[in-house]
Image: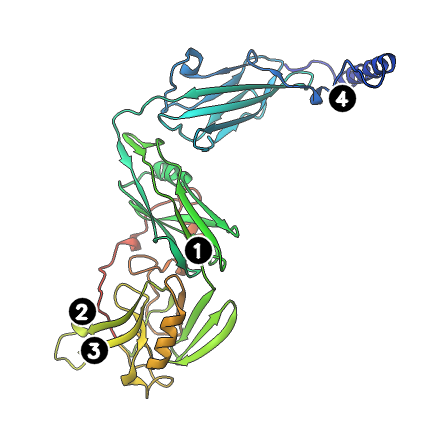
Amino acid sequence: MRDTESPRAGLSGTRARLAGCALLVAALGAGVTGCSSDGSPLSAEPYDAADQISFSGSLDEGKPADPDKPLEIVAEDSDGRITDVVAVDASGRHLAGELAADGSRWHSTTPLAASAQYTVRVSTENEDGRPGRKVLTFSTGKPGAAKRLAVTFGPEAGTYGVGQPLVAELSEPVKDPAQRAVVERGLKVDSTPAVTGAWYWVDDKKLHYRPQDYWPAHATVQVRSNLEGIKVGDRLRGDAAKPLTIRTGDRVIAVTDAAAHRLTVHKNGEEIKEIPVTTGKPGFETRNGVKVVLAKERFVRMRSTTVGIAEGSAESYDLDVHFATRVTWSGEYVHAAPWSVGSQGYANVSHGCVGMSTENAEWFFDTFRPGDLVEVVNSDGDTMEPFGNGFGDWNLSWDKWREGSALTGSGKTPGTAQEAARLRPAAV
């Protein structure tokens, strides 16, 4: 028990101590005191709590700690309790932990890093409420034989549109939900301005990260891995990873209304241009939904055979196309289509792409960058796939997205996440 006195008795004792301090100050003068500055035990200098707490495992023996075992700190003195624990390694990584409600025990809830040095600051409180402190430095041992889990972040450093997801590619597959949670906790994303976001397991070796809404315009986004030396699973530990910083430009979004045959461009919330277009005709309908610009090609040769249309058939084609902005890997572009100018704004005659005049296509090409957004509405086509054919990430609701995280959902790989073939030539 910390204190068997009643609350009233404890209050009386505190009043007596304060009265004693007041009398001593009166006797010795205002500049000299035998108590703390305000007479309260909470303002006293922290005492050495070394005899009040104990550390788990080999820490007591002065040996390197086993990184595969949690760190545990126990309040040995029944008249005191632990109030706070802060554990940080030499690289600045914090060790997460959980403190018992009664302050009797604290234990780490994330793995220790191997071959690392930690500084642990423990704050305590005795029965009178006086604070104590103990600072301990210890090292962890080397890991046993294990594979290294490397992480590669994408896209490349640069400036992108506000729809650009972050990608983390793993060198080894991670299937177990608990291990996936360890990985996610180690992948840190910071954005200025700050946003709410989450990782999604596309498959066993790939994660995507996106905010709840699009990134803010002119934001700075940094992603890094804190997994180096951390145990992910049996015989699998995190390796060092190169951090990544990207920036976002203006908020540029194109909305194509396939039924109205119009494409409207918005920049930072304002409409700046409306363009007459043609989209996919029956049997070749353009996909509905939000797509992210993947790349831009000033010239591309588009052949029908690459999308399964037999050469010599009524639908076959072989065309040189200019100012092509790619939005799917399977061949959907926004591009110049001078051969269909008469239908643009009136009818859908393409094989799935969004076609416009050469002048408008050049303007679109110059205005949009990778990461900008192109949405199609009112088409009879299917909805853009979330994964495997470009970045269809924004076609999942925020609740559905969180289900793909091992921290906020099941973290299970969806059946629709298989990679599609990347067909470079496209449909016109």
Measured from the top left, where is residue 156 in percent x and y? 34, 53
Q: Return the residue at label 4.
A: 37
**Looking at the image, which residue sits at the far left?**
312
Do the residues bearing badges 2 and 3 touch, measured as CB atoms within 8 Å? no
Closer-to-camera residue (163/359): 359
**Can you give x and y, in whole percent of width and height, for residue 101 in the image?**
58, 26
Q: Are marks 4 and 1 in contact (CB under 8 Å)?
A: no
Q: Dot 3 lies on which element?
A: strand
Residue 164 seen in the figure: no
Disc 3 crowd rating (10 Å Cα; few below 14, some 14-19, many 20+) is few
State the separation of the CA atoms marked 4 and 3.
86 Å
Q: Amino acid at mark 2?
A: Thr
Quarter of the image for residue 162 reads bottom left
Residue 247: give its label. Answer: 1
Question: Given the image, on which type of amino acid does mark 3 rest?
Answer: Leu
Q: Which mark is residue 319?
A: 3
Which of the marked residues, 2 or 4, is nearer the chain's N terminus?
A: 4
The residue at the point 60 percent across, 13 percent down is 78
Estimate the spatial distance between the alpha carbons at disc 4 and disc 1, rounded to whole Å.
51 Å
Front: mark 4 or 3: 4
Reading the chain from its start, which is encountered first: label 4 or label 3? 4
Amino acid bearing label 1: Arg
Give how far across and how far down residue 330 sits, in percent.
Answer: 25, 65
Crowding around mark 4 (Cα neighbors within 10 Å: few <14, some 14 to 19, many 20+) is few
* 267 shown above or below 102: below
Query: Circles 1 and 2: CB distance less than 8 Å?
Result: no
Q: Quadrant of residue 367?
A: bottom left
